[in-house]
Structure formats: structure tokens, C-alpha cells
Image: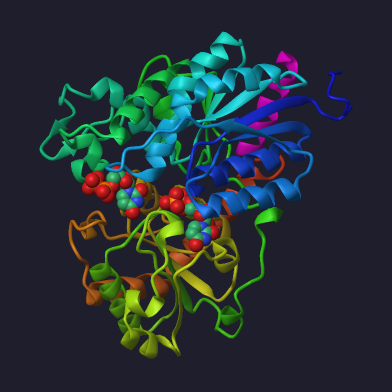
């Protein structure tokens, strides 16, 4: 056995996530899962993080799992005030990635593999090639979104794929053009597009692509990817999810939930980095009151949590707060989403469809009302509605000013999800399938065991 000093460790894997809780969370969960299979883990992070949520989560993670070795990548300064701060951080990490080489080559015992965020693939894959170190890309969104991510560089510029307001991803049924992230259709250059194109192209050279999904949940895109229909020359695309929430993420349940009847509360949150306009906040508040459902609502007006400093009354209106007193809990700060979704009082989730939120809703069996806001979220909402995990009102459009959805309309859809018995039964079945996929002998679990076996043999 190795020079690890730990005779039970069978392989040594390092992780490098990019930025934002949506990327960090699946990396942490996969790291913990590999550790539970006796894999030695080194976890590399860029310093400093964009959000407070990331830095707090990382300190909790490292103090809970002292066996996991932290490593820090120093960052070269890069800024562009016109771009999204999380994309700027991807770019800063990419521009600093030469500093990763000495880190990777000095890690002992020698690594069996590196698991890289898809948004860092274009600069990290060449480094691991130089070191002959196997590189597996962890794609932190849906398999559906990965079909676009991986093929976009073959489509860009040709416009052949755009016709009659449809957009054709090779090997799949054409989709409405309105589902494609707007920066990919725009003539304007953006970090979103250049990064996605470079990373998607480079991922052909990865040793494998891992996705936080499971076989029977996204069969069609997974088959198209692995049959070479989306793009030729791809490495294996392996579904290994949904990643289970970890012990270190547990917290106290919200006291407010304790007194609420089973399945009576709708949880409303747009994730860790989605700002909602003041006008839309007011309509959403109106919709929640009209629905007459009980609710927990996380209100956010800024992308980066460090900037969320407005008084709640100023955001949602003092009138609203008075009216909501008996019906709901409204907050403008981080909540433990896992504790909320696992609570039996929660019967619905109005969500932007960040992929972690989708996997958490399925894990806890909570029906979704999908309201995608930007980026990959319409692709994810499509997966949600096709799989029967929730309802997506397609004509609500993107967030960020495209349109303001009225309170009355929101209230109807909230009720539609909360009162839908059939949906509840369907979602309970998805929950069982999801948990079975990662349990011993399940489809995703088998893939993880195979990967570890392979890493063990290549050491
Ligand atoms: N999250 C949370 N509390 C919050 C906001 C977010 O626990 O107040 C967690 C959520 O459970 C999920 C992650 O942060 O694990 C957000 O990732 P997701 O992919 O859903 O969306 P993103 O924030 O990247 O848009
Ligand atoms: N974006 C985000 N959180 C938000 C709003 C936008 O992560 O709350 C992302 C979104 O994916 C978009 C990029 O940031 O591609 C640029 O956002 P911008 O607000 O301003 O939208 P756009 O210029 O694309 O209309």
C-alpha cells in the first residue's frame, strides 16, 4: 500500500471547485461520500471566496472532517465590474491555475485523480495532462444542461441550430430558443459564453464527466451523451447522484415550522445568488398572501450575500409584514434549506431551479413550482416538469426584468402545486428512486464503487 500512513486508504483524490454555493455544495458532498468509502481527500479552494456563505460553509466542513486535507490556491487579482462576481471568480481562478501545478505535484501521497469543476476545465485539464494525473470533471448542473454545455462550441457561429424559435442541440429534440441562457444567444461577448465554450470544448479531453443526477431520472440526455450523438469523442458521462446532504450541513429546524400542519407550508427561495427586483418582490408577496397558504420566504435583492443589508420592511413593505404575521415567516438572510425541506410541514417549494435545489427537493420529496431566473435554470425546470417533480409555468419568462409576474397569477400556481395530490404521490416515488440510486447496489452507487476501484488500480 501507499505512503499515506493509513492502511485503509485505497486512493487519494483531490477536488477543486470554482465559486458559489451551487458549485461548492456538490463538491463537498462528493468529497464526504468518497471519504466514507475510505478514499483519502484533499480539498483545494481559492482564497478568498466571493460569498460569506462559502467561507462559513468551508470552515464548518474542515472542522467537521479533520481527515480531509485543505489546500489553498492563491488568486491573481482580476476584476471587471460589468460582469457577474461569481463568473469573475471563475476567471480569476483560471488565470491563477498555473499556481495549481506546484500544489498538485507536491501533494503526498501522490494523487490518483483530480476532480475539477466544469467551469475550470479549460485551464486545469492541460495541467493534469502535464502531470499524467487523471482528471474527472464534476458537472454541477443537470445532464440536460450538460448537453448544451458540451456541444455549444460545435454550434456557435453556425446558427444552423436556430430555426422557428427552436434551438437544436445535436442528438436531442429541438427546444424552444427561449430556454437557452440569453448570453448564449446574444451577439454581445460575455464571460458566461466564452467560459462555457472553452470549458465545454476542453472537457472532451477529461478522463470522465461526473454528474449529480441518476440514470432513470435523466435517461434521454445521458443516453445521447454516451452514444456520441451530442458531440463525438466524449469521455464517459457518469451519473453518480443525487448526492446526499451531509451531517455537517445539519442544523436546528426552524422553530416556526414546529406548530404548522403537515404539508401546509410553501417554501420560497431563489437560491444563494439570485437577486429579485423590488417590483417582483412586491408581487410575489401579494401572491403568497392571496394563495392563503402558509409560507417561508427568503427574500434577496443582491447577488452577493455580503451586500444583503436592507431592512426586511424596506424590501417587502411594512404593510406586507403586518399582513403576513399569522401566515408566514419572511427572512432576508441565509436559512438552512435542507432542514426546511426535510420538515413534514413543508408541502411545496417555489424555486429558481438551481440544480442543488432540484436534487434537494427530490431527496426530501417536496413538489416544486419551478420559476427559473437565469443561466441553466430553464433547462433544469424542463427536467423537473418532464420527470414529474413539479410544475413549470413556462410563460413566466426569465427573472431580471424581462417581465413582472403578477401576484394573482403566482397565487393560482402556488395553490395548484400545494393542492395537487397526484403530484405529491409522484414526487414521493421519485424520492424513493433517488435514494435507491445512491444506496448500496443502486445505479449511482455502483458507478462510484467502479470509479474508486479504477483509481485504486491506477495509483
Ligand atoms: N441554500 C441554503 N440556504 C439559503 C440559500 C441557499 O441552504 O438561504 C443552499 C441550497 O440548499 C443549495 C445551495 O445553497 O444547496 C444553492 O444551490 P443551487 O444550485 O440551488 O442554486 P444557486 O444558489 O447556485 O443559484
Ligand atoms: N445572474 C446571476 N444572478 C442574478 C442575476 C444574473 O447569477 O441574480 C447571472 C446570469 O446567469 C447572467 C449573468 O449573471 O448570465 C449576467 O447577469 P445580468 O444580470 O445582469 O443579466 P443579463 O445581462 O444577462 O441580462
User: Seen in the image, is 222 located left or right of residue 157?
Assistant: right
Q: Quadrant of the C terminus?
A: top right
Q: Nearer the viewer, residue 193 or 231?
A: 193
Q: Nearer the viewer, residue 434 or 115?
A: 115
Residue 114 to residue 366: above or below: above
User: Seen in the image, is 77 located left or right of residue 132?
Assistant: left
Q: Position of residue 245 (x, y in %)?
A: 63, 52
Q: Position of residue 453 (x, y in %)?
A: 72, 23
Q: Residue at x 55, y 83 (%)?
A: 260
- The mark tally for this picture is 0
The answer to which quarter of the image holds residue 158 is: top left
Q: Nearer the viewer, residue 240 or 302?
A: 302
Using the rendered image of the protein, determine whether residue 412 is visible from the camera's viewpoint: no
Which region is colored magenta? 443-459
Q: Quadrant of the N terminus?
A: top right
Q: Nearer the viewer, residue 18 or 328?
A: 18
Report the colour scheme: rainbow
Q: Magenta segment, principal secondary structure?
A: helix
Q: Position of residue 215 (x, y in %)?
A: 52, 38
The answer to which quarter of the image holds residue 229 is: top left
User: Seen in the image, is 213 located left or right of residue 8?
Assistant: left
Q: Position of residue 391 (x, y in %)?
A: 35, 61
The answer to which quarter of the image holds residue 67 is: top right
Residue ranking furthest to the left: 164
Residue 212 to residue 373: above or below: above
171 part of magenta stretch: no
447 part of magenta stretch: yes
Using the rendered image of the protein, determine whether residue 116 is visible from the camera's viewpoint: yes
Q: Residue at x 41, y 43 (%)?
A: 86
Q: Residue at x 59, y 71 (%)?
A: 343
User: Seen in the image, is 400 located left or right of residue 10?
Assistant: left
Residue 219 to residue 205: above or below: below
Amino acid at each position: 500500500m501507499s505512503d499515506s500512513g493509513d492502511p485503509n486508504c485505497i486512493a487519494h483524490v483531490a477536488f477543486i471547485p470554482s465559486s458559489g454555493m451551487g458549485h461548492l455544495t456538490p463538491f463537498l458532498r462528493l468529497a464526504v461520500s468518497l471519504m466514507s468509502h475510505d478514499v483519502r481527500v484533499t480539498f483545494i479552494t481559492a482564497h478568498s471566496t466571493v460569498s460569506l456563505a462559502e467561507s462559513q460553509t468551508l470552515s464548518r466542513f474542515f472542522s467537521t472532517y479533520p481527515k480531509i486535507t485543505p489546500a489553498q490556491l492563491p488568486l491573481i487579482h482580476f476584476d471587471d465590474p460589468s460582469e457577474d462576481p461569481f463568473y469573475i471568480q471563475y476567471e480569476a481562478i483560471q488565470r491563477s491555475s498555473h499556481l495549481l501545478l506546484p500544489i498538485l505535484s507536491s501533494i503526498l501521497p501522490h494523487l490518483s485523480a483530480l476532480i475539477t469543476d466544469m467551469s475550470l476545465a479549460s485551464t486545469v485539464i492541460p495541467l493534469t495532462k502535464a502531470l499524467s494525473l487523471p482528471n474527472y470533471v464534476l458537472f454541477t448542473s443537470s445532464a440536460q444542461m450538460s448537453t448544451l454545455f458540451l456541444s455549444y462550441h460545435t454550434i456557435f457561429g453556425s446558427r444552423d441550430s436556430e430555426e422557428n424559435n427552436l434551438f437544436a442541440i445535436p442528438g436531442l429534440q429541438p427546444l424552444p430558443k427561449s430556454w437557452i441562457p440569453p448570453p448564449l444567444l446574444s451577439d454581445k461577448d460575455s464571460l458566461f459564453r466564452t467560459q462555457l465554450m472553452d470549458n465545454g470544448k476542453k472537457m472532451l479531453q477529461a478522463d470522465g464527466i461526473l454528474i449529480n443526477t441518476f440514470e432513470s431520472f435523466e435517461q434521454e440526455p445521458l443516453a445521447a451523451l454516451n452514444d456520441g450523438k451530442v458531440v463525438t469523442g466524449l469521455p464517459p458521462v457518469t451519473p453518480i447522484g443525487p448526492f446526499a446532504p451531509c451531517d455537517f450541513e445539519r442544523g436546528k429546524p426552524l422553530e416556526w415550522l414546529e406548530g404548522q400542519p403537515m404539508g401546509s407550508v410553501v417554501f420560497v427561495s431563489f437560491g444563494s445568488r439570485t437577486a429579485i427586483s423590488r417590483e417582483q418582490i412586491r408581487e410575489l408577496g401579494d401572491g403568497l398572501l392571496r394563495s392563503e397558504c402558509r409560507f417561508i420566504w427568503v427574500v434577496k435583492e443582491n447577488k452577493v450575500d455580503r451586500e444583503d443589508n436592507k431592512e426586511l420592511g424596506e424590501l417587502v413593505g411594512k404593510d406586507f409584514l403586518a399582513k403576513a404575521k399569522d401566515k408566514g415567516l419572511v427572512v432576508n438572510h441565509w436559512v438552512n434549506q435542507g432542514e426546511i425541506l426535510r420538515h413534514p410541514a413543508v408541502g411545496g417549494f417555489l424555486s429558481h431551479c438551481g440544480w442543488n435545489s432540484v436534487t434537494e427537493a427530490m431527496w426530501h420529496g417536496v413538489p416544486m413550482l419551478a420559476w427559473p431566473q437565469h443561466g441553466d435554470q430553464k433547462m433544469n425546470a424542463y427536467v423537473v416538469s418532464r420527470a414529474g417533480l413539479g410544475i413549470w409555468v413556462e410563460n413566466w419568462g426569465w427573472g431580471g426584468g424581462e417581465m413582472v409576474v403578477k401576484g394573482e397569477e403566482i397565487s393560482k400556481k402556488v395553490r395548484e402545486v400545494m393542492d395537487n395530490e397526484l403530484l405529491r404521490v409522484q414526487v414521493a416515488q421519485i424520492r424513493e428512486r433517488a435514494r435507491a440510486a445512491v444506496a448500496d447496489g443502486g445505479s449511482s452507487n455502483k458507478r462510484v464503487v467502479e470509479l474508486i476501484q479504477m483509481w485504486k488500480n491506477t495509483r
